[in-house]
Amino acid sequence: MMTGALLCLLLASWRPVADAVLAPLENWHPPLVDPTGLDGVAAVVVLGGGWWPDARWPISAQLEESSAIRLFEGVRLLRVLPEARLVVSGASRGGEVAPVALGYAEAARALGVPRERILVLDTPVDTAGEADAVREALGIGPRLVLVTSASHMPRAVRHFRAVGLDPIPAPTHRRAGRANGERLRDWVPSTEELRKTETAWYEYLGLLALGWEHPRSR
């Protein structure tokens, strides 16, 4: 049993295995590379992540990596969608820190987004709550673009569709397939690859809880 457990741990920490389980989630929805053809988009919704507010650091250092990348993508899309507002969401789970939505808003303003174009939803603590909050704030009619990590996008879209919204996916923060296998470290088990495997199984279990439905089946 110990040998089997160690083998499973090594495999889960190996890049080919980690990429194999994570890539299907990240490839589920194609990236929104060119948004210029989109018409009537009322909002670009950036889902919450992690952050560590500290006045001693610049806001760029306070956002977790995934959060910073999500916000960067949201601002990129907002620049070519002049009628859209930036909707940032996410609360603090334990109440020990300020809501990440406030960090998003501060960072967006630092990147040049006018205050009046930012809508802050700082109460939802999970993706289901974010979907409810967006529906309550915007209603069902407006067209919206949804920004989150690529591995999280399948589950996020399911939550938004469950409340009657039909978002345009804009996945970002891809982690699988970023190595070409030419370096020795690409083949050595690592904690980074283990975290990718952990993320994948977390999302698969979330999809299982929601009920599996691939977009191609719609």
Image: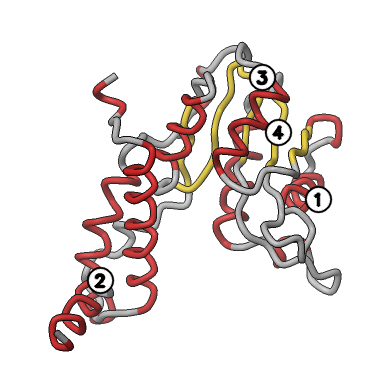
Gap between marks 3 and 1 measured at Cα: 21 Å
Identify the residue shown where x is 20% and y is 84%: 6
Gap between marks 1 and 4 measured at Cα: 12 Å
Image location (x, y in percent) of residue 104: 72, 49
Gap between marks 2 and 3 measured at Cα: 41 Å
Identify the residue shown where x is 67% and y is 17%: 139
- Few, some or many C-alpha atoms within 10 Å of disc 1 (few <14, some 14-19, many ≥20)? some
- Say which residue label 2 marks: 12
Residue 86: mark in rendering: 4
Answer with mark 2 or mark 4, whichever residue precedes in sequence: 2
Image location (x, y in percent) of residue 68: 62, 55
Gap between marks 2 and 4 measured at Cα: 37 Å
Answer with mark 3 or mark 1, whichever residue precedes in sequence: 3
Identify the residue shown where x is 77% and y is 38%: 120
- Say which residue label 3 marks: 42
**Kind of residue at badge 2:** Ala
**Kind of residue at badge 1:** Glu
Q: Nearer the viewer, residue 203 or 32?
A: 203
- Few, some or many C-alpha atoms within 10 Å of disc 2 (few <14, some 14-19, many ≥20)? many
Image location (x, y in percent) of residue 19: 26, 60
Say if mark 2 contacts mark 1, CB within 8 Å: no
